[in-house]
Image: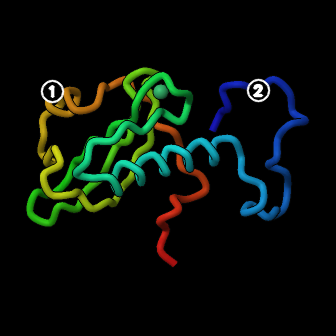
Amino acid sequence: MPTRSSGGSSTSIYSMGSEDRSVTMTESERLWESWYQAFRKLREAWPADVDVPCPNSDHGRVRISYTGDPETRIGMAIVWCAECRQGIHLSRVGIPDGADMLTFDATEEEEDAAVPPDIEILPADPAPPSDPS
Ligand SMILES: [Zn+2]
């Protein structure tokens, strides 16, 4: 995968061999984690409507858009900010009762209405914290 900002080669923490990744979180892991924490705050507060600031700064508030099965209320979530148009994707989440959600057969227009199509989804690396063990 090409990196967008390759200013120098000396700052890379990805070197040969296996390093202890649990000690050294990369910037992208830290950012992903703070998005995930924002998601958890919103979920824990549900159905209360709380303001969770965007992890990138305090310019915006985090929203969640769900897509899933209306029967099981299991699906995926996109956690995103309308100001900086960034967010994360969670592939398997429980969708709370009463939350707005799309179904998996939603049209592209419906999807675009829920989440703007130009949202930049941050990569989850190495794995979501909810990874079962
Ligand atoms: Zn933002």
Look at the numbered disc 2 and say if its residue's Cβ is closer than 8 Å to ligand 1.
no
Q: Position of residue 27 (x, y in %)?
A: 69, 41
**Residue 12's image quarter?**
top right
Q: Earlier in the sequence, mark 1 or mark 2?
A: 2
Residue at figure coordinates x 39%, y 36% from the top left: 62
Pick out the residue farthest to the left: 71
For the N terminus, give its image quadrant.
top right
Give the residue type that dot 1 points to. Glu
The structure residue drawn at horizontal position 56% and vertical position 30%, both measured from the top left corner, is 56
128, 82: nearer the viewer: 82
For label 2, the SS is loop
Callout 2, which amino acid?
Ser
Residue bearing mark 1: 109
| Position of residue 68 measured from the top left corner of the image (x, y, whole percent) | 19, 53
Q: Nearer the viewer, residue 93 or 51?
A: 51
Q: Residue at coordinates 51% horizontally, 27% vertically from top-left? A: 58
Answer few, some or many: residues within 10 Å of disc 2's Cα (few below 14, many 20 plus, some between 14 and 19). Answer: few
